[in-house]
Amino acid sequence: MLTTVTAALRRSPVSTLAGFSAENPDFHTGIPIRRPMSLTELLSRIDDLQQRIVAAGPLSADAKRKLDYRLRLDWNYHSNVMEGSSLTQQETRTIMMGSVTVSGKPIRDVLEMQGHDEVVTMLLGMASGDLGLSEARIKEVHQKIVHEDDPAKKGQVGKWKEDPNHLTNYRGERIDFTPPAEVAGAVHTLPDHTMAQVERIERKVKHAPHPALVAFAFHRAYVTTHPFHDGNGRTAGIFSNLLLMRFGYPPVVIRVDEKDTYNNCLAEVQVYGAPNRPLRDRYPRSVTKEGHSAPHPELVNLFFGWGNGVVAAGSLRSSGEPVGV
């Protein structure tokens, strides 16, 4: 972990903690009352963090290498375990170091982890202008991160689903995803619409959406479409992060211990359509998260990012203190 960064975060005032805004002190205790930040406040907080990242200047090559490594480890481990991988975090680390086998574990899990790490490493090394969406790129990534031992399923990798898929949510309600016959059209439209919003942001068009909201909108639409027979959650996370990284924001990872909260919030959006606020508000909060803690269940951050870590590292570097990783 980033020990020095963590210490810096714990010294942060109440008003800068993830997802909270300080109000008037309690009359009896004098302790500031904390309330959840509004969406507007969260977006403003993200922009403030981003400005501090830029102002701090580039990290040293060694610090960046260590941050990238820890990000790869968390991203690879949590994204794959979320979709059923049996690999532990230590086994994930072993595979990242070049091992092609892990004793007693399915070769599928190993190959999918290797492919996922290859994609993540590629994204981290790409220039922002190269981080774009397209149908071809989505299929290419799917081919890298999904491995099938079943001959009947091998032909489905990198191709839109042929059979309907659905899930049953925590309320016992069935959610049917986009029918196979409609997937090609939906996935053709989604990247085009998303990149049109990206262009509006880059051209600084008045009332252009915030990058975090564009990333969320893509994530929501993609998992609601569920275009592949498998690997939809991993590809959704990869391309949501691609959008964030294009604008210089840190990628975020849905952690295993946040899986139920993530799925439950997403189910509210997918079934009822209108109540987008719970997930929409939590997505931007990821970039302002402090460590892994959340003082109230309703404020659990669904996405774990290195935004605070990078800012704190930059702040420490600016003050002349060493960055401990």
Image (spheres, rainbow, N blue to C red):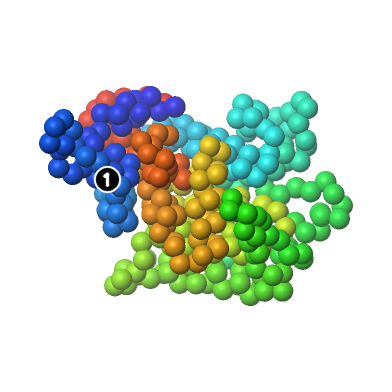
| Quadrant in the rendering for residue 312 | top left
Q: Residue at x 78, y 37 (%)?
A: 107
Specify the amino acid type for callout 1: Arg
Q: Residue at x 45, y 72 (%)?
A: 196
Where 301 falls versus 135 (above or below)? above
**Left or right: where does residue 261 sit relative to residue 149?**
left
* Residue 293 seen in render: yes
SS at badge 1: strand
Q: Residue at x 16, y 37 (%)?
A: 26
| Quadrant in the rendering for residue 141 | bottom right
Quadrant occupied by the N terminus: top left
Give coordinates of residue 155: x percent, y percent.
81, 58
Residue position marked by numbered label 1 in the rendering:
35
The answer to which of 188 and 262 lies nearer the viewer is: 262
The answer to which of 302 and 299 lies nearer the viewer is: 299
Q: Residue at x 67, y 48 (%)?
A: 145
The answer to which of 252 and 93 lies nearer the viewer is: 252
Give coordinates of residue 152: x percent, y percent.
86, 55
**Left or right: where does residue 10 sit relative to residue 134?**
left
Give coordinates of residue 72: x percent, y percent.
54, 38
Where 39 falls versus 302 (above or below)? below
